Image: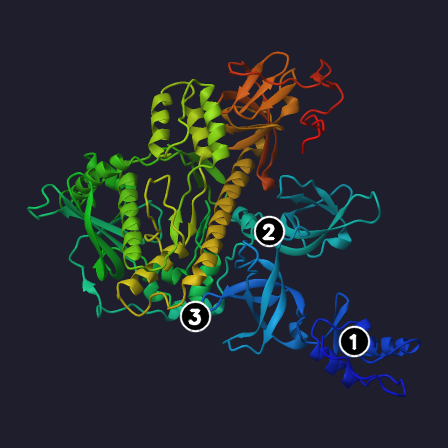
Amino acid sequence: MKQKRRSRIDDSLPTKADILAFIAENPGQAGKREIARAFGIKGAARIGLKKLLKELTEDGHLEKNRKRLVKSGELPFVGVYRITERDSFGDLLALPMKWDEEEHGPAPKVLIQPDKKSKAVPGIGDRVLAKQLDKDIEHDTAKFTARVIKILPVRQDLILGIYRRDTVHGGGRLVPIDKKTQEMPIDDSGRGDAEEGDLVSVTLTRTGRGKTPRARVQEVIGPMASEQAVSMISIHALDIPYIFPPAVLEEAENATHPGLMGREDWRAIPFVTIDPADAKDHDDAIFAEPDEDPNNPDGIIAYVAIADVAHHIPFGSNLDKEALKRGNSVYFPDRVVPMLPERISNNLCSLREKEDRPSLAVRMIYNADGRKIRHSFHRVMIKVAAGISYNQAQAAIDGEPDDKTGPLLDPILKPLWDGYAVLKKGRDDRSPLELDIPERKLILKPDGMLDRVFVPDRLDAHKLVEEFMIQANVAAAESLEKHKQALIYRIHDVPSLPKLEGLREFLASLDVNLPKGGNLRPEMFNRILGKMGNTEHGPLVSTVILRTQSQAEYHPANIGHFGLNLQRYAHFTSPIRRYADLIVHRALISALNLGDDGLPGGFEPKLEAIAAAISSTERRAMAAERETKDRLIASFLADKVGAKFHGKIAGVTKVGLFVQLHDTGADGFIPAKTLGHDYYHFDEANHAMVGEATGETYRLGDQVEVRLVEAAPMAGALRFEMLTPGTKSSIKGRVSKGPFRKGRNGRYSGRKKPGTTRPRRKSGRQ
């Protein structure tokens, strides 16, 4: 606080100019009490001060921020900001959450500094509580600096749902998209412009204590009856940016195709792209040939060329900031929310057939055993010989080429498969984690609703492309490490000790031993999967091992990739759809002197925050894709309530079972209280629910028949009734018994409700 101003001898009030000057000198710290103390105002004179401050507020000179006063048009000393972008150096920029643009013009940008004492790193889209530091800083756009006090949680006061008219009683109701939120009434006075079937956001209001909460529409997002509407729920619920700002689109339209200058001419190499049949962008092309070096008998040379996105996305440009904000493309059954505008992703950077395209490529030489001898990176111009689908490539190799793949078979496809045979030897020696996880594909009707679900075949063509990409990613990480260039790794930690201990206890119940201690490696899991694969417990063991694994993420500090059993690994092969790969491209350009559009100097300290941000956007994309599939499938099954289905138990919790249906992959819930005629205990170690009196057991992976009882399409929620009796428990060890049972009337006897646990008796030891 600045030094107090001397009180006037005649005890009169300060002028309005004096008050405004004092507040300006003490931003965010001046309340009515502080002003009175500074000017020596006491007693009845405080009434005059209060009137003076009211006049200044009504005239628009002052605004109240909590119990402090700030000059109108200035930001509070401590305020809430939303982080919106990064500047050209990777620093975070934010805008105030409360700002009147009509009154004061555009909101000032604030340079955000993280809280050094906290491990939490804010990212684009986060809301933070921050306090002002320096004003009038030297920055292109920011007016001052603020340090984060706290990262605020995602707002819970706004609820998304579908507006439905109540034709009987009048008014309407909200059908929430959150599975845990109940329907709530919407009065006509709170309806706003919402119409039947609109996706809306609402706030809750209460008319008194104990009254039913009512919803008031805050925003009408759009009608849900239109094509491609279901994915919009996840886009809005998870705050996924999906509209490109005009400045970004303008830069994309102005982007130009580079010439050959400064690039090697690789257009004579017959690269091919192998992608899904419906792919619109192609960011990787491959080729392989025998190594003619007599010192490398039966060796091969593998080429991987990747779209040179760094050329088209200048560092610090609007395109670059928007790409970092999005982090990655998001793939829905009915649409793609791309990281880059279509002119970049589907045109200039897409490796189109028979067209010149700038690329960043790697040439890798392997011996006959699949061990890499050396590799080199090149900035090149390529011309893809052909673009084909996985099914086309596989059919050609299997002896059924079509008109397009027939001419490619001998000169391109067979050498590729020979190259894959060599790489596969190296992969088999490395022994990465081999988990067979079927991925279902949803086919939609023209109206955007689900038509059918199927599991595509896992072809050698998929494995071939995957292995070429893995090797290119390894080469990128190795080159950057060799040149001591900072980068963002793709890391995958070993399973945590608690998860390993739980897995060990579970496997012991099946007479399978997981060794303790030592260097844990994926091949240990592979041996168990191989041993149990053809037994009745094979699917269960595979599921439990999968759930034991850690989640992969991005980080500038390398700990290796456990699942792939690689010491160093970085994403390099998909810069059109992942910002992590664009960072690696720029790092390679800088480290290998391949141009002047690499990472700028002094950028290394920014990598940890960027890695945290893109790890977060990746998880957000996965959640959005999963939730959209759940909603589409729930809508598909909504008119099949009462029907019977076959599935497997995909999850066991103390409150019930999750069952996944075979045909559609739909997940539904069975509450524990609806199981059988017994009280069921949750056996966490064995992933099972065990009946107390009968020993009847439902276990993760069990094949069951269920009846659909309820479907909530907008929430993506299904509720089932179990029709299959449980098996007699074969679980080793004692299952604890609870204090109550389920009687014939369906009620539980005892002192406690089901699903609860006994409180532990306190002892002298804490």
First in sequence: mark 2 or mark 1? 1
State which quadrant residue 81 falls in: bottom right
Tell me the kind of residue under disc 2.
Answer: Pro
Which residue is farthest right?
Answer: 44
The residue that disc 3 covers is 250
Q: Give coordinates of residue 712: x percent, y percent.
A: 61, 37
- Could you give the CA–CA distance between mark 3 and mark 1, rounded to whole angstroms? 42 Å
Which residue is farthest bottom?
Answer: 10
Which residue is farthest left?
Answer: 294
Q: Give coordinates of residue 297: x percent, y percent.
A: 9, 42
The residue lying toward the viewer, choosing from 653 and 464, is 653
Q: Residues within 10 Å of mark 1 (few under 14, many from 20)?
A: some
In percent of the image, x 45 and y 23: which residue is there?
Answer: 507
In percent of the image, x 64 and y 55: which residue is there?
Answer: 220
First in sequence: mark 3 or mark 2? 2
The residue that disc 2 covers is 223
The residue that disc 1 covers is 57
First in sequence: mark 3 or mark 1? 1
Which residue is farthest front?
Answer: 764
Tell me the kind of residue under disc 3.
Answer: Glu
Q: Residues within 10 Å of mark 3 (few under 14, many from 20)?
A: few
In percent of the image, x 29 and y 49: which residue is there?
Answer: 474
**From what the image shows, is residue 4 above or below residue 198?**
below
Residue 617 is left or right of residue 723, and the answer is: left
Q: Give coordinates of residue 53: x percent, y percent.
A: 82, 77
- Could you give the CA–CA distance between mark 3 and mark 2, rounded to whole angstroms? 29 Å
Q: Give coordinates of residue 201: x percent, y percent.
A: 65, 52
